[in-house]
Amino acid sequence: VRSARLRYDAVVIGAGVAGLTAATRLAEGGASVCVVATGVGSTHLAPATIDVLGYDPERVETTGAALADFVSARPLHPYALTGTQSIAAALEWFRGRVEAHSPSGYRYLGGLERNFLLPSAIGVARPSALVPETMAAGELREHSSLCFVGLPVLRDFHVRLCAANVARLGVEARGIELDIDVGGRPEANAVGLAKRFDDPGFRASFAAELAPLVHEQRIGLPAVLGLRDAHGAWADLEQRLERRVFEVPTLPPSAPGIRMFNALRASLRAAGGRLVMGSRVVDAKRSGGRVVALRAEASGHEVIYEPSWVVLATGGFGSGGIAMDSHWKAREAVFDLPLRYGPEAGRPRFDPTYLAKQPLARAGVAVDASLRPPGYENLLVAGAALGGAEPWREGCGEGISLASGYRAAELLLKSEDMAAAA
Amino acid sequence: VTEDVLHGLLRGSLDHCVKCTICETACPVSNVTPLFPGPKYAGPQAERYRIDDEPSVESSVDYCSGCGICTQVCPQGVQIAELNALARAKLKAQDGVPLRDRLIARPTVIGRLGTPVAPVANASLRWRPLRAFVERTLGVHRDAPLPRFAGRSFRRWAKRHRSPEGTRKVVYFHGCGTQYYEPDVGQKVVAVLERNGFEVEIPKQDCCGLPLQSNGLFDDARKYVLRLASALAPAAREGALIVGNATSCTLMLKREAREILGLDEDPDLELVSDSTYDICELLLELHQRGELDTDFAPLEQTVSYHAPCQLQGQWIGKPALELLALIPGLELRETDARCCGIAGTYGLKREKYEIAMDVGAELFAELDTGGDELVACDSDTCRWQIEHATGGTCVHPVELLHRAYGL
């Protein structure tokens, strides 16, 4: 079998938040970087808020202050490895990159001071450290009244359920629907709608139809307010409706998530990093503790990458970075790295109650303080592949991805051979 | 037997679909027309209604352009585009393939007819009344971008050309676009390869069968691609790489013929599939080994680079970007938009022309062809579509390398 051979200072496997963050930081630091990904990561599915710490186990108000206790009680948690300083630095970096590489004006607000408390797609309060500015006015600690507006062409956005759940939190909230014409189509997904909201003409007629229906102080719309001109669409609607307007996350696909992906991809591009999409890294060649080559599927012949460093950011169970076979054995998909923090052999893997604490949920790759799995010198792990966390219970998924991706890059840029290469 | 086994494997990938909708966010077609409800709907979801020996009941898949972006972005490895190609062929086998599709899927026939009478053919194909007539009778849209016959075939030049003896040998697979419409691009590819020490062999060759495949004419497509494979295989057997500049045709050889046409057991095709490189992919690898001649003269030129879908479907990223970045003075910008819309023969069709133009609208808006900006794009049909829609000039990336070498 023939193969093309490509050398880079670093190959990052995975194009989610962790992978793109690590790769961009490395490229910014002067390294030659290639991201190899089977496909798009969870960016296109997730609400695109950056949740750093939402529950410990009670809801967290002040993230920065809560993190120290949280980490000291959990020495195996990814945050204990990245350190809280990396979290702060990563958030700062992320805000900067989104602002610099999004269409004009689009930005994130927040930090480690105080969590935002924003409604999810079904009106559940969700604590987030950083949020798109277009979502910020959904703050549920404020008492001004809310009108959630559903668009019947957008299926699975149940606006009355959303409003009813928000009302239970003590905020005056109502759900209404506005039928809009999307070229005669019976339905449209979030991306199709977002493209329409990029058009000022569409926004104008939409606002004109909506204005008479709303008497509340704030208006919540599904997060479809533009892709290329999201800031413009949001600001335009606020002005036309003479009210604060905010986006509410939708079921997938996620328009704000695509904006985030686009901003990170543009940052990577601006820093000179390369992105290969559609190619799965199937195995690796080791020499002692070093990964010397990665074998990736391509069309026809294979591609062999020969990186000095590898960052594994393939995600957890949801993305296939960790998979469980028919014998119920969970394994890491590329390097077959040992998993830890899962249930011990013979113990139950699942609790029959779906939302209960699931024994398998914390399973992931074990790494040392330099994010390296045991026995590997030039392989670092970042993102949801890391074990020891329960992101959906702790409200920390994006925080882990961002902080560990950032930390992995910082560690590598400080390493001697990388410094020499740069 | 081969086809059934492979169909099984392709279909098996369906089990990995978690209905995440990532493919639908990326599909250029479903984002502009309700006639195609999207790759997930037409593929993984509708597949349950496609049962062997039973009629096909889902016809929207005819509006899939076959760009393959869905497969490329799927995080779960579902081969959506390939499954939809099979579904389209089943639909065509059932409903019949119009004369138009049988004709435009045969570039060799068109090329051989048009080349000797190029001036007349070119003038006729730009004569509005005739195009209106052809649209009514045949169904080729009157505004569709049809390339101009060069009036001389690439082979005529190739037959006379003697490649200097080099340290390493490559086989050049030029494709029909180079053969009948852009022989100068082929000459530049050869010159750039020779500049880098390759001895270029150009065996007699014909169409790869891709247009037939994308129009659902699988049996004919198989004949073409197997014939091409047997023409290219002898040199590959002696260790030569095969290099092409037509991205959709190299993708056909690399992967699609084996996966979509189910030709996974032909030894010639297997060898050819394994040995085929896109020209920029090969040059980038050369550069990575420190063996590319990088003695480029400065080009004070702004270039927007658009990577065709069928190049990205090779899963090698965008090698041209790294190559063009080596040219001093060249100001390079990568486009964000995904697809120009043409998808080979898709955008030529009366009922699909407007869709194709709508698909490409995002790309066309990004290109600033009013000034002295050039567009670079690796695929010939995409270049013709971009030039048609923007009025600008669109070149193969190798043409820029050729210029910077001062050849």
Image (cartoon, rainbow, N blue to C red):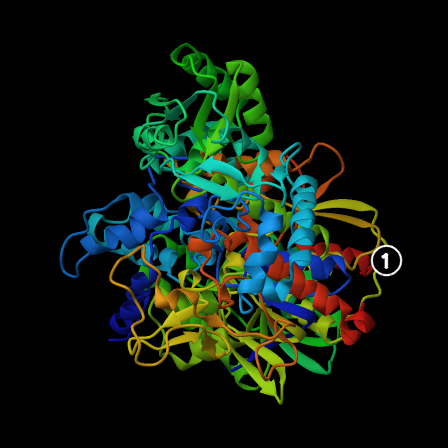
**Residue placed at 41% from the left, 26% from the top?**
A171
Dividing the picture into quadrants, the one containing residue A168 is top left
Residue A150 located left or right of residue A417: left
In the foreground, A44 or A201: A44
Give the image location of residue A53, x and y in percent.
53, 51
In the foreground, B43 or B89: B43
Give the image location of residue B254, x and y in percent.
48, 69
Q: Please determine whether, in this image, residue B250 is positioned above or below residue B351.
A: below
Q: Mark 1 lies on which chain?
A: B
Secondary structure of the residue carrying numbered label 1: loop
Residue B184 located left or right of residue B298: left
Residue A266 located left or right of residue A142: right
Dividing the picture into quadrants, the one containing residue B30 is top left
Give the image location of residue A265, x and y in percent.
62, 51
Q: Please determine whether, in this image, residue B194 is positioned above or below residue A55.
A: below
The residue that label 1 is drawn on is: B297
